[in-house]
Amino acid sequence: MKVYQFHPFGLSALMIMPDSHIAIHTWPENEFASIDIFLQAQYDPNESLPLIQRYFHPDEVKIIELERGIKKGDGTLVLRGLHH
Protein backbone atom coordinates (compact mmCIF):
# COMPACT_ATOMS: atom_id res chain seq x y z
CA MET A 1 0.00 0.00 0.00
CA LYS A 2 1.22 3.48 -0.88
CA VAL A 3 0.08 6.48 1.15
CA TYR A 4 0.75 10.16 0.50
CA GLN A 5 0.02 12.38 3.49
CA PHE A 6 -0.86 15.98 2.65
CA HIS A 7 0.03 18.79 5.05
CA PRO A 8 -1.61 19.98 7.15
CA PHE A 9 -4.19 17.21 6.53
CA GLY A 10 -5.69 14.81 4.00
CA LEU A 11 -4.26 11.79 2.25
CA SER A 12 -4.27 9.69 -0.88
CA ALA A 13 -3.78 5.94 -0.56
CA LEU A 14 -3.56 3.16 -3.13
CA MET A 15 -3.60 -0.57 -2.49
CA ILE A 16 -2.85 -2.72 -5.53
CA MET A 17 -3.70 -6.42 -5.50
CA PRO A 18 -3.77 -9.00 -8.30
CA ASP A 19 -6.63 -7.93 -10.62
CA SER A 20 -7.92 -5.43 -8.03
CA HIS A 21 -7.23 -2.07 -6.41
CA ILE A 22 -8.60 0.31 -3.80
CA ALA A 23 -7.88 4.04 -3.98
CA ILE A 24 -8.82 6.59 -1.30
CA HIS A 25 -8.51 10.37 -1.52
CA THR A 26 -9.55 12.59 1.39
CA TRP A 27 -10.23 16.31 1.72
CA PRO A 28 -10.97 16.76 5.45
CA GLU A 29 -11.23 20.54 5.05
CA ASN A 30 -14.25 19.88 2.78
CA GLU A 31 -15.50 16.88 4.79
CA PHE A 32 -15.16 14.74 1.65
CA ALA A 33 -13.56 11.40 0.75
CA SER A 34 -13.57 9.53 -2.54
CA ILE A 35 -13.05 5.76 -2.56
CA ASP A 36 -12.63 3.62 -5.69
CA ILE A 37 -12.98 -0.14 -5.19
CA PHE A 38 -12.17 -2.35 -8.20
CA LEU A 39 -12.40 -6.07 -7.36
CA GLN A 40 -12.54 -9.46 -8.99
CA ALA A 41 -16.10 -10.74 -9.55
CA GLN A 42 -15.92 -13.23 -6.67
CA TYR A 43 -15.81 -10.29 -4.23
CA ASP A 44 -18.65 -7.89 -3.53
CA PRO A 45 -17.41 -4.30 -3.03
CA ASN A 46 -20.65 -3.49 -1.15
CA GLU A 47 -19.37 -5.66 1.71
CA SER A 48 -16.86 -2.83 2.33
CA LEU A 49 -19.59 -0.35 3.26
CA PRO A 50 -19.84 -1.19 7.00
CA LEU A 51 -16.07 -0.75 7.36
CA ILE A 52 -16.10 2.53 5.42
CA GLN A 53 -19.00 3.82 7.54
CA ARG A 54 -17.27 2.76 10.76
CA TYR A 55 -14.05 4.65 10.01
CA PHE A 56 -15.26 7.63 7.96
CA HIS A 57 -18.68 8.31 9.61
CA PRO A 58 -20.17 9.72 6.39
CA ASP A 59 -23.36 11.75 6.48
CA GLU A 60 -24.05 10.59 2.94
CA VAL A 61 -22.82 7.73 0.74
CA LYS A 62 -23.06 7.91 -3.03
CA ILE A 63 -22.34 4.71 -4.95
CA ILE A 64 -21.60 4.64 -8.66
CA GLU A 65 -21.17 1.12 -10.02
CA LEU A 66 -19.43 0.68 -13.37
CA GLU A 67 -19.59 -2.48 -15.43
CA ARG A 68 -16.11 -2.95 -16.83
CA GLY A 69 -14.95 -5.16 -19.65
CA ILE A 70 -14.67 -5.18 -23.42
CA LYS A 71 -17.78 -4.93 -25.58
CA LYS A 72 -18.02 -6.90 -28.79
CA GLY A 73 -19.55 -5.45 -31.95
CA ASP A 74 -23.01 -6.74 -30.97
CA GLY A 75 -22.81 -4.94 -27.61
CA THR A 76 -22.28 -8.03 -25.44
CA LEU A 77 -19.66 -7.75 -22.76
CA VAL A 78 -16.60 -9.98 -23.05
CA LEU A 79 -15.23 -11.08 -19.66
CA ARG A 80 -18.58 -10.36 -17.99
CA GLY A 81 -18.28 -10.95 -14.29
CA LEU A 82 -14.50 -10.71 -14.27
CA HIS A 83 -14.53 -7.42 -12.39
CA HIS A 84 -17.06 -5.25 -10.55
Image (spheres, grey):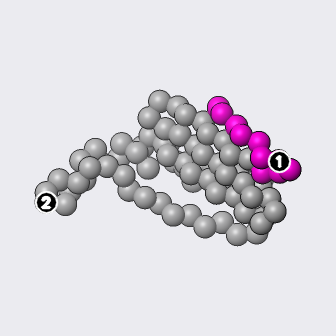
Magenta span includes 9: yes
Say which of marks 2 and 1 sits in front: 1
Q: Quadrant of residue 67?
A: bottom left
Q: Is residue 17 left or right of residue 75?
A: right
Amino acid bearing label 2: Asp
Of callouts 2 and 1, the N-terminal one:
1
Residue picked out by circle 1: 7
Magenta segment boundaries in residue numbering: 1-10
Q: How many marks?
A: 2
Q: Can you give x and y, in whole percent of width and height, for residue 1 in the image?
A: 65, 32
Q: Is residue 75 above or below residue 79?
A: below
Q: Can you give x and y, in whole percent of width and height, for residue 63 in the image?
A: 56, 64
Residue 65 shows which numbered tag? none
Q: Is residue 78 left or right of residue 74?
A: right
Magenta span includes 37: no
Q: Can you give x and y, in whole percent of width and height, for residue 79 in the image?
A: 28, 44
Q: Residue pushed farthest bottom?
A: 60
- Viewer can see residue 50: no
Residue at 19%, 60% in the rendered image: 75
Binning the other alpha carbons within 10 Å of mark 2 as few (below 14), some (14 to 19) or many (20 upward) gives: few
Q: Is residue 62 above or below residue 11?
A: below
Amino acid bearing label 1: His
Q: Contact (CB < 8 A) between labels 2 and 1?
A: no
Q: Main secondary structure of the magenta part?
A: loop
Residue picked out by circle 2: 74
Residue at 49%, 46% in the rendered image: 38
Q: Is residue 29 above or below residue 77?
A: below
Q: Is residue 61 left or right of residue 63?
A: right
Q: Quadrant of residue 62?
A: bottom right
Q: Can you give x and y, in whole percent of width and height, for residue 49 in the image?
A: 65, 54
Binning the other alpha carbons within 10 Å of mark 1 as few (below 14), some (14 to 19) or many (20 upward) gives: few
